[in-house]
Amino acid sequence: MMENRHGKLRTRVLAMPKDTNAKGNIFGGWIMSQIDIAGALTTNDIDAGNVVTVAVNSLKFKKAVEVGDALSCYGKIINVGNTSIQTQIEVFAERVVDHKEISVHVTSAVITYVCVDKNGNKRAVNKDNDY
Ligand SMILES: CC(C)(COP(=O)(O)OP(=O)(O)OC[C@H]1O[C@@H](n2cnc3c(N)ncnc32)[C@H](O)[C@@H]1OP(=O)(O)O)[C@@H](O)C(=O)NCCC(=O)NCCS
């Protein structure tokens, strides 16, 4: 799997016309949903099992995403607590400009997940696994 200083590539998806807001840019809520999926997948690095999102600690939309962009979310774990796992997600939009592919850093986020049991109650993180 592709890896760089921002972590591993977790999702890569094409931004479609159905994902636009009233101004024709890609809707922030759609980008947030991609980020949440990427963050949850990132918790697999420590084989966390079932997790739920407890908090979006920070999120900045730095640049607009356009229809036709390939949106790539990179993620890494930045902290492991007793029951929680904090992830950092960096989002890049890849598009072709003047016959060249460019990659624009569009969004940064920190999202926290909590490990839960089958009843949805929080449980301890398995700390045997490195990240
Ligand atoms: C997630 C949930 C199980 C946590 O239960 P809780 O009793 O409220 O948990 P706590 O307040 O003790 O927090 C649990 C952990 O989350 C951390 N946490 C809570 N709020 C946080 C925040 N705003 N930012 C970062 N971490 C946070 C706590 O520090 C704690 O971490 P630790 O055990 O590693 O020290 C419960 O709040 C819940 O079910 N929420 C709904 C989840 C959901 O539906 N998400 C959306 C769909 S996935």
Image: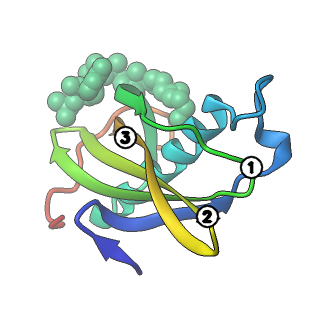
Disc on the earlier residue, 1 or 2: 1
> In the drawing, what numbered circle is on residue 67?
1
Report which residue position mark 3 lands on: 108
- Nearest the eye: 62 or 18: 62
Residue name at image x 36 percent, y 37 percent: 109
For the C terminus, the image quarter is: bottom left
Residue drawn 37% across and 40% down?
A: 108
Q: Distance between the residues labelled 2 and 3?
A: 23 Å
Mark 2: amino acid: Val
Q: Mark 2 points at which residue?
A: 97
Q: What residue type is labelled 3?
A: Ser
Q: How crowded is mark 1: few (under 14 residues within 10 Å), some or many (20 or more)?
A: some
Which quarter of the figure has residue 57? top left
Above/below status of 122 relative to 87? above
The mark tally for this picture is 3
Provide residue 80's location: percent of width, then percent of height. 17, 46
Q: What element carries label 3?
A: strand
